[in-house]
Each structure stands twice: as structure tokens, then as C-alpha cells.
């Protein structure tokens, strides 16, 4: 299977236009057409349909796109691994989402990189739902997720935890410092992050299950925090994310007087086949040392 054709198919699926695909890849449009034709001949199915509005993927094309991303990702991982083969003793390939990295992983990974100069580090920031399909690929060493997984080739351990708190801008919502009841939640402007779709349901006792109650919806917790600081509304966030802002009185903690707030638990996933390799052994040793010092 031609890797150039796979890459061109991915770009075409994203652009939905032959001209823009050619421009992005710095090739002529006829080359784009030839590569797609070669790919369709190899697979034996039509992958795209051209119409006046541009390009549409067929059902087979939509299915193949998922595998195309995986194939191209494996190619990139292979090239990286080969490039560091003789320069470093080993490599650590770690996946986590942005807020996990910012508040829990960053300091650990920095300390690891300084302590292990002979280990090459590849950090990948992705949403948890994008990481899970990649866990079957053996090139992943560590993944940090918001829920436990049971996979044959992976070991799953509890990682870091944080209390969840309702917060809002200090100046805007100081009148709520004594707390708020569940029934009163719909009466204040609420911010929502899609990452917490199932978790918010549990925390709120189904008080927030109507999406129309939310003034702003965003899929990144750091974005929700920024809206909170600006006074746009209140949001349930992990305490670890807002400790500094609470101390500086940019945000105020709003107690939920008749709701049991849960503790958010993260999990670290290890590739069992790599547990005895220097990269993972050094990571686990460092993590255990940090945990003992807490």
C-alpha cells in the first residue's frame, strides 16, 4: 500500500477539495487524482465521490480513513524510533490530555528528562477519546486517562486524584460564598465542558442534565476555567486546576450544600511488553519515589 497515497487521502478527506489538497502537499492536482485512483484500485472499493460541492467520502472511505490515520501514525512512530535507535538507550512514548499534562504530568516528565538523559521522550497531547483507540498499538508506553481500562497488553493503576469544586469569578459570585443548593443551580450562569458529560451527571444528581441550562459549552477544561475567571459563569472543575486562582481571589469556591461532591481519579496505563525496558523502569522508579515523598 502506497504511503504517499494514504497521506494524500487523509489530506483530501480533511480538505474535501482536490485543489486545496494539491496546494497543501505541494503537488499537482493530477497527482492527487492518480494517488486516490491507485488507493481505490488496491482496496477494490470507491473511497470518494466528487460533486459540485467538492468531495464526499463513501461509506468505505469513512471506514478506511480511521485505518489511514493509524497507518500513517505508525509510520511516523517507526521513523522516530529508528532515528533514536543508536543515539539513545531507549525511548518513552507518553500520551495524556492537556490539563493532565499541565497539572500532573509536566513536572514529573521534566524531572524524568533531566534524570534520564539517555532516554528519548515523545510527548503526545490528545483528548482521552482519541488516545483509547491507539492503546492497541505497541509503540505507546504510557497513557494517562480519566477512567480505568482493562486491556490484555496494558496495566492500569490509579494515578492522581483531585476534589471537584464549583467555582466562579470572585468579584461576580462572592455572594455565593456560603453555598448553593442543587435546586438553585439552574438560576446561575453555568459553564459546561463535554469532557465531563458523564461525570457531571453523577455529581449533580441529574440537576444539570438539560443542556439548555449551560451558558457556554467547551471541550477543554482550561477554556472553562478562563471563562470562569472572566465572570462568564460557574463551573465544576478539579481543585488542582484552580488552587492558585482561589488563593489569589480570582475565583471563589461555591459550596454545594446538598450535593455529595466526588473526587476525580485519573489512571495511568502501562504497556506490559515494555515494563522491563529502561524507559518504563526509570519512569516507574521515579513515580514511586515521588509518591513516597508526598
Image (spheres, helix red, strand yellow):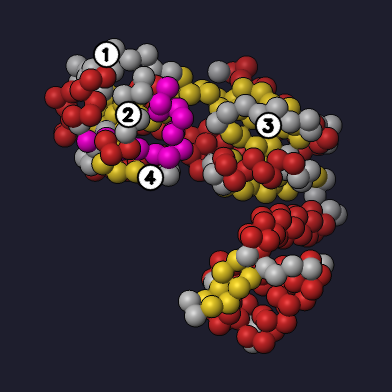
Question: Would residue 9 be counted in the magenta stretch?
Answer: no
In the image, residue 74 sits, relative to residue 29, either above or below, namely above
- CA gap between label 2 and label 3 equals 31 Å
Quickly name the residue at label 2.
208
Whether residue 99 sits left or right of residue 115 in the image: it is: left
Q: Disc 3 versus disc 4: distance between alpha carbons?
A: 26 Å
In this picture, residue 290 sits left or right of residue 264: right
Report the span colored magenta.
189-202
Alpha-carbon span between mark 1 and mark 2: 16 Å
Chain-order first, disc 2 or disc 3: 2
Mark 2: few/some/many CA within 10 Å (<14, 14-19, 20+): many
Helix, strand or loop for disc 2: loop
Task: Find disc 3 in the rendering and name its residue.
Answer: 269
Q: Position of residue 136 (x, y in %)?
A: 74, 41
Using the image, tell me which numbered label, if any, was put on residue 218.
4
User: Residue under circle 1?
Assistant: 257
Q: Are marks 3 and 4 in contact (CB under 8 Å)?
A: no
Amino acid at each position: 500500500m502506497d504511503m504517499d497515497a494514504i497521506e494524500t487521502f487523509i489530506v483530501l478527506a480533511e480538505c474535501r477539495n482536490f485543489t486545496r489538497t494539491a496546494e497543501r502537499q505541494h503537488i499537482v492536482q493530477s497527482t492527487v487524482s492518480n494517488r486516490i485512483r491507485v488507493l481505490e484500485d488496491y482496496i477494490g472499493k470507491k473511497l470518494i465521490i466528487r460533486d459540485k460541492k467538492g468531495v464526499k467520502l463513501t461509506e468505505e472511505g469513512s471506514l478506511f480513513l480511521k485505518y489511514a490515520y493509524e497507518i500513517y501514525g505508525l509510520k511516523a512512530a517507526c521513523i522516530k524510533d529508528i532515528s533514536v535507535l543508536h543515539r539513545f538507550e531507549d525511548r518513552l512514548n507518553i500520551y495524556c490530555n492537556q490539563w493532565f499534562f499541565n497539572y500532573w504530568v509536566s513536572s514529573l516528565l521534566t524531572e524524568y528528562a533531566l534524570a534520564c538523559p539517555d532516554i528519548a521522550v515523545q510527548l503526545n497531547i490528545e483528548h482521552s477519546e482519541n488516545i483509547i483507540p491507539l492503546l492497541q498499538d505497541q509503540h505507546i508506553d504510557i497513557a494517562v486517562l480519566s477512567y480505568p481500562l482493562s486491556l490484555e497488553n496494558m496495566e492500569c493503576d490509579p494515578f492522581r486524584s483531585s476534589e471537584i469544586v464549583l467555582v466562579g469569578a470572585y468579584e461576580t459570585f462572592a455572594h455565593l460564598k456560603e453555598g448553593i443548593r442543587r435546586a438553585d443551580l439552574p438560576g446561575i450562569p453555568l459553564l459546561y465542558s463535554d469532557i465531563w458529560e458523564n461525570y457531571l451527571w453523577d455529581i449533580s444528581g441529574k440537576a444539570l442534565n438539560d443542556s439548555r441550562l449551560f451558558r457556554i459549552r467547551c471541550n477543554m477544561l482550561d477554556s472553562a476555567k478562563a471563562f470562569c475567571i472572566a465572570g462568564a459563569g460557574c463551573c465544576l472543575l478539579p481543585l488542582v486546576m484552580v488552587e492558585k486562582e482561589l488563593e489569589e481571589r480570582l475565583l471563589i469556591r461555591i459550596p454545594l450544600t446538598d450535593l455529595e461532591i466526588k473526587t476525580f481519579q485519573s489512571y495511568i496505563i502501562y504497556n506490559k511488553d515494555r515494563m522491563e525496558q529502561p524507559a518504563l523502569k526509570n519512569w516507574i522508579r521515579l513515580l514511586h519515589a515521588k509518591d513516597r515523598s508526598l
